[in-house]
Amino acid sequence: MPRNARKNLCSQFFHVMVQGLNKEYIFEKEIDIKVYLRYLKEKLEGKNLQMIAYCIMNNHAHFLIQTEDVKEISKLMSQVNTKYAIFYNKKYDRCGFVFRNRYKSEEIMTYAHLLACIEYIHNNPVKAKMCEAKADYPYSSFGEYKGQQEVLLNITAIAEIFKGYGISLEDALRENYKLYRFLEDVEGQDKEKVKEDV
């Protein structure tokens, strides 16, 4: 069955999801996740897009991506998933498809939806009972929001998003006040507003 061509959308933000074939594990070990993240970092270079949030689970992954050209997402996911499938098949002595589909994407239309999406992505391991708190899971961008590591995020791009809420990057990063604390405040105080906007 032929695939429909993806069209450029009004939004600049997209929630992108990939999943293993038959919902099987495709990130079985730590090295698998690290390899996938390395491929993502390599292929992000030179593309007109920014990674805003991510979470790599055992059988699927979530990404929040900003771009003015949705075709850039197609290029990124095709390149990364193809490269990873070659690695995965060789490592586990198998052949055939690794991913269920090329990817799924959802358009993000409001700031509230954007914040809700970031929270959803970071909360994925907690919901799956893989850990008790978001901070306990090492394979999401939550640690980057806390300033613990730098893997895929572009803090400058994220700072532009938060400008809409009247918070500067300098204020967000000064002393112990991190961007994730602002997210937690939004989660606690503006829950109803987020529901209305989404």
Image (spheres, grey):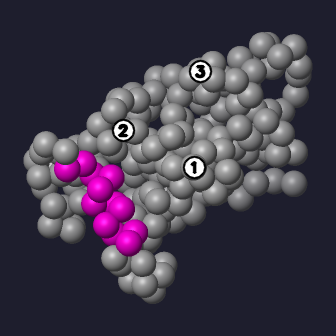
What kind of residue is marked 1?
A: Glu
Q: Are the residues at dot 2 and dot 1 in contact (C-beta closer than 8 Å)?
A: no
Secondary structure of the residue carrying numbered label 1: loop
Residue beneath the point at 49% across and 48% down: 134
Total tally of numbered discs in the picture: 3
Judge left or right: residue 194 versus residue 77: left
| Distance between mark 3 and mark 2 Cα atoms | 18 Å
Q: Report which residue position mark 2 lands on.
A: 144
Nearest to N terminus: mark 2 or mark 1:
1
Q: Report which residue position mark 1 lands on.
A: 132
Q: Are the residues at dot 1 and dot 3 in contact (C-beta closer than 8 Å)?
A: no
Magenta stretch in the rendered image:
177-188
Q: Position of residue 189 (x, y in %)?
A: 34, 76
Give the residue furthest to the front.
132
Judge left or right: residue 12 versus residue 26: left
What kind of residue is marked 3?
A: Val
Secondary structure of the residue carrying numbered label 3: helix
Q: Are the residues at dot 3 and dot 2 in contact (C-beta closer than 8 Å)?
A: no
Q: Position of residue 2 (x, y in %)?
A: 81, 53
